[in-house]
Amino acid sequence: MIHLEAIEKHFAGPRPRVVLRDVRLDVGPGEMVAIRGESGSGKSTLLNIIAGLERPDSGAVNVGGLALDTLDDDALTAFRRTQVGFVFQAFHVLPYLTVAQNVALPLTLAGQRDAAVRTRVMAMLESVGLADRAGSPPRELSGGELQRVAIARALVHRPAIVLADEPTGNLDPDSAAGVITLLRERMAAEGACGVLVTHSVEAAQRADRMFTLRSGTLALAAP
């Protein structure tokens, strides 16, 4: 589903540096891989390249059979709306929407507003244990519950890939373990593959494979 070939990314400026150096990665259907690295190591840049939010200086990015380097900005936006689910550290739920309305956002942005949307949203909330909070405002939820809302929102439109950027960074250890377990279960149920970037060894060890990103180089970590 995800194929990265010889990805290079450089940042110019007063102190130019290599962010990604000859990065190669393949992620198969239903697989989750984790990438660990220090702050500033390029983890988020790599996620942005997979999502088509940034373009590499060289190399090839293929996601779900699409060569991202051949797509213009409009096509990349359409790709993200239909093929990518995002889970962030800060949850990014909208405070003025209910839980159900937040989960429905990817479908709403795609122009879907019929009864099937509500059915799909409620099914996703049921799957993450929050069906009874559908009408609640986000301020009434705990951090762990908010991240479950984010997982439901990331998967509601049945994306091919899920990109998770430090999804447990704001959670206590028990909630963090539950969120990663839930994310894996829901990805498997929906047939999505995923890339998780994290500082947490515990979170990374729940992935199928773990990589480290250091000095721009991606390497498979020992099990």
Image (spheres, grey):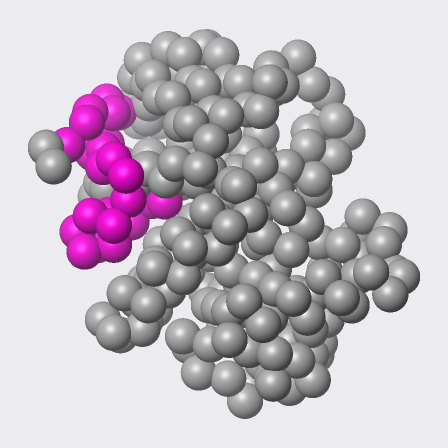
Q: Position of residue 91 (x, y in %)?
A: 50, 65
Is residue 77 rendered to the left or right of residue 13? right
Vertical arrangement, residue 105 with respect to residue 56, above or below? below
Q: Within the image, what quadrant is residue 84 found in?
A: top right
Q: Is residue 181 left or right of residue 174?
A: right
Q: Residue at x 69, y 18 (%)?
A: 71
Which residue corresponds to the image point at 54% horizontal and 67% vertical from the top-left?
A: 127
- Residue at 64 percent across and 76 percent down: it is 99
Q: Is residue 208 left or right of residue 82?
A: left
Residue shown at 51%/18% (left/top)? 61
Q: Is residue 56 visible?
A: no
Residue 144: % across, % down = 40, 75
Q: Is residue 108 above or below residue 170?
A: above
**Relative to residue 59, is residue 12 depicted above or below?**
below
Magenta run includes residue 215: yes
Name the image quarter holding residue 212: top left
Q: Which of 107 and 200 lies nearest the eye of the viewer? A: 107
Name the residue nearer the viewer: 179 or 77.
179
Q: Which residues are magenta?
A: 196-221
When asked about the image quadrant of residue 135, the answer is bottom right
Residue 56 magenta-drawn? no
Residue 155, position as x, y percentages in the image: 58, 52
Image location of residue 157, percent across then percent down: 68, 50
